[in-house]
Amino acid sequence: MTTLVWSIFCRVIDNYGDAGVCIRLAKDLASKGQKIKLWIDEPKILQWMAPNLDPNIEILDWPIAPFALALEVDVVLEAFGCSVPDFFQEVIAGSISEKPKPSRFGHETGDSQINQRIQWINLEYLSAQSYASNNHGLHSPVLFGIAQGAVKWFYYPGFERTTGGLILERGMRQRIKSSELTPSPETNSFKVGLFSYPQAPIVELLAELKKQNKQSGTPCSLRVAGGQTQIILKKAFLPFSQNLSATNSEQGLEINYLPYVSQDEFDNFLWSNDINFVRGEDSLVRAIWSAKPWVWQIYPQEDNIHLEKLNALLDLLDAPAFVKKIHWSWNCVPPSGANIPSFELNLPDLGDQEKWTNWQEWCCTARSKLLELGNLTDQLLYFVLSKRQKTVE
């Protein structure tokens, strides 16, 4: 396969999700022999999120890295509209040239074509809505500004064949195959993974887990990933707990605070739980690959626009009605005020084997469907190389 030099631009948002996607993509591209320059504005997070990176990945502190490095590139990938810096746009525009256009018989026709040596890819946000399929792979000329005359290609991850698919490394595919041959060991506790935004109804989740323990007698363990959720839990419910690794038990509910972990360790965390509450893009996809029951908290937007995105995914994957209801509860802000107890977050009773089996089977079916899409990285490479033959070489 042709080796190209990629510059991937990533701005770290407060929840690290954008960085998580970029790092996984960089690692997977590097594993396929591509040379990666990861321009990231908070490189310090890589110390825990992605230690021991492939030597084909060079970390550049954006915007401190020197201008000269912009010249050493074949593909620029702009992640999630983070906006490539001006000096890089100048380099992209400077890679444009005009060449004679050959006829299909190989000789010149007198016409000319515009070639752009540096390919410019805009990696968009993940969505199950129709616009992802409709706009995937389209190009857009830059009509004004520093990069005027250049062309940018839009690449949409997604859940259908008409999109770019999902990141699925070879190692994860092998893990999935192995898991299908080996049943999960039975345990005497109910392990709940929690990775959420601050708006999540955590109080209601705790109340639900206490209720589940009381009804079934099964110990419940709430395992909280590193981040803002831990701060909220400690402040509201466990003011006496100061240690991130501390555990506390009350009426059969144990709360475990986990440190920040690497992406590989986070994947293991999801696979070790009985149910996962996840947020954003990266952890959603990783929860899907685990095929454990999952509940997705989508990034909140004004006018509840985010709920349209949530429903699009649940409808596309044909989620059972009770799973949809749980998602709606988890993504809607509960009523405020002590005299308004109408909001509830109801998981199936732990003794309701039929519902839990249905949920588990739905997760496996959804995973099998999405496995057929192939790996986003492989499709991105094919997309870049095929466009390169027409517009560069």
Image (cartoon, grey):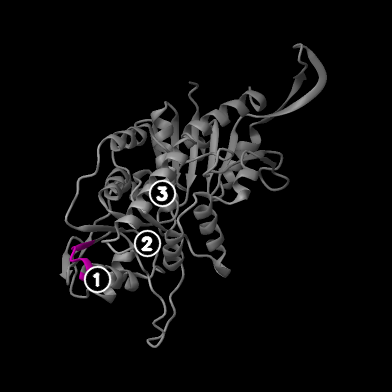
Residue picked out by circle 1:
210
Residue picked out by circle 3:
362
Answer left or right for 368 relative to 54.
Answer: right
The region drawn magenta spans 214-221
Residue picked out by circle 2:
196
**Secondary structure state at the residue bearing disc 1:** helix
Q: Is residue 55 visible?
A: yes
- In primary-sequence order, the first of circles 3 and 1 is 1
Within the image, what quadrant is residue 175 found in?
Answer: top left
37 falls in the magenta region? no
Residue for point 24% across, 44% down: 184
Please state, as top left, top right, bottom left or bottom right, where the C terminus lies in the image. top right
Residues 179 and 105: in front is 179
* Picture layout, residue 201 above or below residue 40: below
Answer left or right for 210 relative to 347.
Answer: left
**Secondary structure state at the residue bearing disc 3:** helix
Q: Amino acid under label 3?
A: Trp
Residue for point 63% across, 49% down: 131
Residue for point 64% across, 26% down: 392
218 falls in the magenta region? yes
